[in-house]
Amino acid sequence: MLSCNFMLSLVGSVEGLIQALKQYMLKNLGLQLEPKFWRGDKEVPFFLQDLYIFYSLSLLEKTCLLVAPKEIDTVTPAAIRKHFLLLRKISGFPCIYLAATISPHNRQRLVNHGVQFIIPGRQIYLPALGVDWIERGAHCQKHRTAFSRQLSPSSQAVVIYAMIHHKKEFIPLELAKALNYTPMTMTRALNELDLFDIGKTERQGKKRLIRFTQKVSEMWKQSLPFLQSPVKKRL
């Protein structure tokens, strides 16, 4: 079993950070990850190349872009969100922020901005996968976790609602009112659908929306393997 001190000793370099990530995810979620340098980084603007190192990562059969800062705390959470929107547009992959350490204040700001992140030895925040894992105390006690390869009930409700109404795009507030969920829950549902490639999230001015480009029949086939049955028991 890895101690917190050992985990922290690994993250002195980007290579060490990647090794810490692999061991941390294997230990806590049973996932064997093999991040590789992302070859598409030449398409990224120079100012982002100066700030980050990029890795491609297969996570639950989905390709993600792992983004590691070259220096800690040089970019604000708001700026990271903007950078991730640009990176998603260039790469087509959802982004995950990887850092050796993030202050509690900035962690909360990343959560508020919908930025997924992993801090080896400290926290895994991947709401699109239903994972929120926090280490507490000197002995790295687990605080809470949830992990699923299925869509959450709120995401499933969005998919069904979109198919019934034959509408191509929605905003979280609209969905929250229609489905009786909070706007925050709808934001997390949109993140999840984006990661599963069922819908694509984007921003129009200050508004965030999700867009469904497939036909209803295609959307149903793509979503079906991730849907949960509403039947709990047969009598």
Image: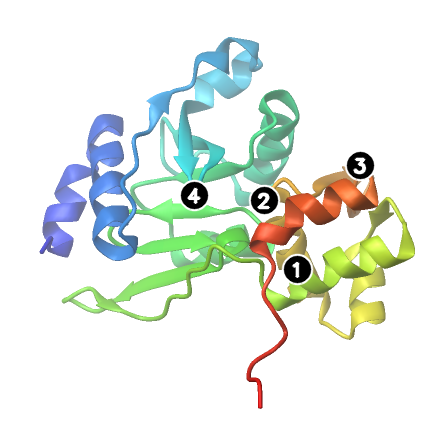
Circles 2, 1 touching at the beta carbon (< 8 Å): yes
Q: Which residue is mark 1?
A: 155
Mark 1: which amino acid? Ser
Q: Secondary structure at mark 3?
A: loop
Q: Give the CA separation, mark 3 to mark 4.
A: 23 Å
Residue drawn at x 62%, y 58% is 188
Q: Give the CA separation, mark 1 to mark 4.
A: 17 Å
Q: Residues within 10 Å of mark 4 (few under 14, many from 20)?
A: few
- Front position in the image: 133 or 160: 160
Residue drawn at x 85%, y 69% is 178
Residue 113 in view here: no
Residue furthest top as drawn: 42
Q: Which residue is mark 4?
A: 60
Q: Give the CA separation, mark 1 to mark 3.
A: 17 Å
Q: Which residue is mark 3?
A: 213
Mark 4: which amino acid? Leu
